[in-house]
Amino acid sequence: MDEDIFYEIFNNSQEAILVLDNNKNIIAVNNTFSNLTNYGRDELINRSIFDIELFGSFSQILKNAWDDKKNDGYWEGELLLNKKLGISIPVWAEFKKTTKEKNILYIITALDISHKKMLENSLDFLRNYDALTGLPNKNLLDDRLKQSIATAKRMKLKVGVLYIDIDNFKLINDNFGYPGGDILIQKFIKRLLPVVRETDTLSRISSDNFVLICFGIKSDKEILIIINRLREALRDPFYIYNNRITITISVGACLYPDDTEDPLKLINLAESALESAKEMGRNTYLLYNTKDTVNIEENFAILSRLGEASKRDEFVLYYQPKVSLKSDKIVGAEALIRWNHPTLGLVSPMRFIPLAETYGYIKEVGEWVVNKVCMQLLYWSKKGINIENISINISPLQFNDKNLRLFLEEVINKYNIEPKRLELELTESMIMKDFNISLGIMEELKKLNILLSLDDFGTGYSSLSYLSKLPIDIIKIDRSFVMRLKENEYNRKIINMIVQLTKSLDIKVIAEGVETKEQYDILKSLGCDEYQGYYYSKPITCDDFEHLWNNNLK
Ligand code: C2E
Ligand code: CA
Ligand code: CA
């Protein structure tokens, strides 16, 4: 073949070509190679291939390709080729060894595959990521979940799967069209991502459905905390085309390995928990749990609405009369909270107060009660219902809240209440946690001139000796003593002793849970001051209380 033609072909081949002599010095280079790498011919010719960092860390491959016997002088594969000023590009490279007239020649060819790579990467992206949000899609989610579970299995950890649905998303699309919906989704994700931990994966699996994988969860409780964090992040309104929109989410959740060890099944369980959650109304959360479905379902239903219950006006206060054993007249009342839950009906404080304590809602609930009671006192005094006092149950967290005193002072002033008409019921166990701190708190509270009582007396430490040290005005003898008054002589003795002791300390005694005439008679004979219980009245609404009060006067 004519040498010129050969040279022409060599120079303009699609492949970049280098030819080395048997010492691996470059003896020929084509234009394509120069163009691709920005190295001029002069910079390459006569230099050892190992002096130029053409293949960076791949120079080892380069050596092996030719020298390794089993390669037989041939290697091909994908490599990065370094351009003159740092940047590298992916190439398909071939290293060949040929012999020409007893001389060994080494030939390197490299085909630029960066376009192909780019295409592959974007295909890979499309296969695994959601184009609108850039989040992993269902495909990648399955992979990540399998990975998370494999790791969790090794490390003996749990993995939480949360199936998240935006409530009423269809309305957004209906009102603002799909572009409006897309804007919302993007803003929604922007809010959620900062509260998702680095080890977690948030993925979008359909228009308004998302799955969050939470790695290394310790218990159900932690899932609730995560859900609450998501909710918090969504609390502020969103704006779409200047329209203010508040969005809520419903969540179904399940736990590896508690609910199932099968990754795909986990997603299904979480989804079915979501379906049930949605049946209970929007803005609810549900944990799929084979062992304790009802209970946990209820807890979730309760929790998911607890934060907003006071705003939605769902709490109600009931009042149980406190009656004098001397005059049989109503002297006061204990305020007892009820929650009118939209689907569960009237929920007992025994159910939701502990949840409110655990999940940080108790302050809100407690403040609501204090406000309501003070309003009621003001209202009743205007109507001539001169109830001596109303007592309020204080939870341990409230008791230890540094702002309690200030808060009470503000409310008392706001409604212009006589402080002694307000009574706080504290329990032995919360006081005994740290006696000295509690004493300090109680002394501060007493400066407001309100009354303090010791609730459920006798169930806890039953140590009478500390009583004299505490600024206590009233002791409430626990129902359990009253209940067994008749059949148990011992209980009568205890109550007698409590009454005698409190007389000497100038503390008032009230018996709880009085249900029968017999109990009433015994308590009266023992010199107990007041009583409370079904025998006189169950806790009742404020309207019923007014009736009872007016009849009681006659
Ligand atoms: P507690 O302070 O011991 O309240 C007395 C409970 O005994 C009330 O239950 C009341 O309905 C019930 N009871 C009253 N008389 C009788 C009786 O003769 N027989 C029987 N068997 N029971 C009687 P409730 O209203 O369900 O309250 C339960 C607990 O929830 C309260 O126990 C109190 O610890 C807590 N709680 C209620 N309201 C509030 C509140 O506003 N804040 C806080 N932190 N806790 C509250
Ligand atoms: Ca009480
Ligand atoms: Ca009690």
Image (cartoon, rainbow, N blue to C red):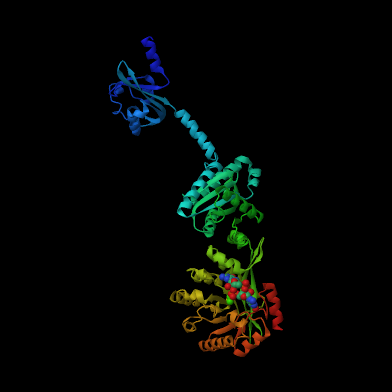
Q: Position of residue 305 (x, y in %)?
A: 60, 59
Asked if residue 174 is positioned above or below residue 86 in the image, the reply reads below
Q: Is residue 434 left or right of residue 164?
A: left
Q: From the viewer's perspective, tell me whether residue 290 is left or right of residue 146.
A: right
Quadrant placement of the C terminus = bottom right
Q: Ligand 1 shows up in which quadrant of the image? A: bottom right
- Is residue 416 at least partly visible in the picture? no
- Quadrant assignment for the N terminus: top left
Give the side of residue 4 with respect to residue 151, left or right: left
The percent coordinates of residue 99 (x first, y second) are 33, 19
Q: Which residue is drawn at 59% across and 53% down?
A: 251
Number of numbered discs overlaid on the protein picture: 0
From this view, report whether residue 409 is shown above or below residue 127: below
Asked where in the image residue 258 lies, by quadrant, the reply is bottom right
Q: Where is residue 279 in the image (x, y as percent from the top left)?
A: 66, 54
Residue at image location 70% in from the left, 78% down from the top: 548
Q: Which of 57 and 543 is in front in this view?
A: 57
Q: Quadrant of residue 434 in the image? A: bottom left
Residue 298 visible in the displayed image = yes
Between residues 197 and 335, which one lies in front from this camera angle? 197
Q: Where is residue 214 in the image (x, y as percent from the top left)?
A: 51, 52
Q: Which of 301 and 248 is in front in this view?
A: 301
Image height check: is 403 above or below 108?
A: below
**Which residue is the extreme one toward the front?**
70
Query: Camera-side residue: 499 or 413?
Result: 499
Name the residue furthest top: 2
